Image (cartoon, rainbow, N blue to C red):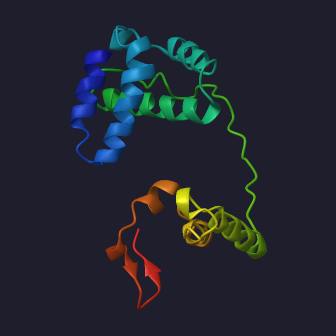
Amino acid sequence: MGEWLDLWMDSRSDWRATARERARGIVVRPIRTQLGNYPLGALNHQAVQAWASGLSRTQGPASVRKIVNVLSGSLQVAVKDGRLASNPAHGLNLPKVHKVSKRYLTHEQVRDLSAAVDAIGRGRYLGHLNGYGLLVKVLAYCGLHWGEASGLRVQDIDFVRGRLEV
């Protein structure tokens, strides 16, 4: 199984670098460590189900599904390649992912949070506005994640059209 995973990963030229690294992290940790020595041809539905059920003890439902999807993708290619008759990862009983209700701040709450963050001040400038309130507004109104906002550069801002290029 470990050799097949390496071959499969190397064959995925259609993936962007970030997708490749994410999948490699999944393959190396939970898949390879537990299934890497398993002979590919001997892998069956029951063995994969037992493995997936074991993942549920240490991983959340969404993580279990992502890990199983990576395994299933590799096994599906093995089916197409004639190495397996069917994909033993199809039809597994996986934990359900519960949707979390999202809570959004009102305009007033964003304004208050922005003002509070701005007023905190830093170091010897205690009591002076620090400008971080603007970051709160960008995060709130542009819907950016922290990583996206922290990666912004001046040239990403179109002042004429009032837009950010993320």
Considering every residue shown, the one lying at the far front of the view is 124
Residue 114 location (% of width, % of height): 66, 69
Q: Is residue 32 left or right of residue 82?
A: right
Look at 29% across and 49% down and name the residue there: 16
Look at 50% across and 29% down and name the residue there: 68
Residue nearest the viewer, comparing 32 with 43:
32
Residue nearest the viewer, comparing 103 with 151:
151
On screen, residue 92 above or below 44: below
Q: Is residue 103 visible?
A: yes
The quarter of the picture where residue 118 lies is bottom right
Residue 102 location (% of width, % of height): 73, 56
Considering every residue shown, the one lying at the far bottom of the view is 160
Count all numbered tags in the image, as a single digit: 0
For the C terminus, which image quadrant?
Answer: bottom left
For the N terminus, which image quadrant?
Answer: top left
Residue 162 location (% of width, % of height): 47, 86
Q: Is residue 85 visible?
A: no
Q: Is residue 141 left or right of residue 33?
A: right
On screen, residue 97 above or below 142: above
Look at 40% across and 14% down and name the residue there: 33
The quarter of the picture where residue 133 lies is bottom right
Residue 4 location (% of width, % of height): 28, 21
The quarter of the picture where residue 35 lies is top left
On screen, residue 24 above or below 117: above
